[in-house]
Image (cartoon, rainbow, N blue to C red):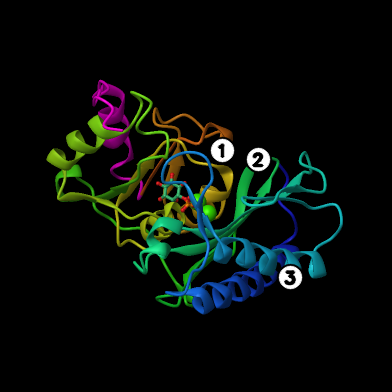
Amino acid sequence: MSLPPESDLQRWLDIATEAALAAGAVLQHHWGNLTNIAEKGRPGDLVTEADREAEAAVMAVLNRHLPADHGILAEESGVQGNPDAALLWAIDPLDGTTNYTHQYPFCSVSIGLLAEGVPILGVVYNPMLQELFRAATGLGATLNRRPIHVSTTAQLAQSLLVTGFAYDRRTTPDNNYAEFCHLTHLTQGVRRGGSAAIDLAYVACGRLDGYWERGLSPWDIAAGIALVREAGGRVTAYDGTPIDIQTGRLLATNGPIHQAMSQTLGQIKPLVVPPLI
Ligand code: IPD
Ligand code: CA
Ligand code: CA
């Protein structure tokens, strides 16, 4: 993968920021005032007018500024342009829809850029807490324009982790429940944030030491992966091998606890919970 020139990355970072702030304004507007909450198929997988309008706001900014050879993959509207484009934007207009519908202020706009499948730029914006995370390869990672770095925690026993549970959790033994129990015992705690993009951004800024999850889509994690790496952290598959973003499964840490987490995830046997619904 060849990295685009720094001047392009800087310009695209500013365009992504403009788009994230525009979508954030839409999310603020609909906060506590939703008229249309629907399920997309799987139980609990919600979509609202805020998701759709926020996505339209992102697309309007990107389409106004970006070169025609860039592709876009957006959660609610799918692919625009060439899905095999060397430079592909991955957009989640509202990551944390469940939180949002309950007015739990942990949700974000996530805008990432993949170069031949590798995340090289990311903007994650939580409009409720007004926290703007930005990064691009070689340009550093920031929170509200101040540099951020991953934590230095070196032991699992001193770590605070985060994870999530995909919408198919009721129907697959690969449901992350055993991993959650096991790592809860080995650490100071495991949070369930409800926005994969913010989970990654929190690893990038050192609030959390590690994150793992399965069943994710490229738009959930493209921006966050760029943030963690640029803040000095590591992102791989569970077993420590290079990540393929299409697998939807990743381990992201500050670095020092990476091997211990990877080893632990490799040892866990699935915990099969009888279906409740
Ligand atoms: C979800 C969130 C959540 C994760 C789910 C995602 P959505 O995205 O990132 O934290 O556990 O797997 O699908 O549906 O709120 O955009
Ligand atoms: Ca999402
Ligand atoms: Ca979403």
Mark 2 CB lies closer than 8 A to ligand 2? no
Q: Which residues are magenta?
A: 254-277
Q: From the viewer's perspective, is 163 left or right of 37?
A: left
Labels 2, 3: front one: 3
Local secondary structure at mark 1: helix
Q: Which residue is mark 1?
A: 245
* Picture residue at 24% right of the left edge, 38% below the top: 180
Q: Which residue is mark 3?
A: 61
Q: Which residue is mark 2?
A: 117
Q: Is residue 29 magenta?
A: no
Local secondary structure at mark 3: helix
* Picture residue at 70% right of the left edge, 70% below the top: 15
Q: On the rendered image, what quadrant is the N terminus found in?
A: top right
Q: Earlier in the sequence, mark 1 or mark 2?
A: 2
Kindly indicate the quadrant of the structure image that contains residue 252: top left
Q: Is residue 135 at all visible to an observer of this figure?
A: no
Q: Is residue 175 at all visible to an observer of this figure?
A: yes
Whole-angstrom CA distance, mark 1 to mark 3, is 25 Å
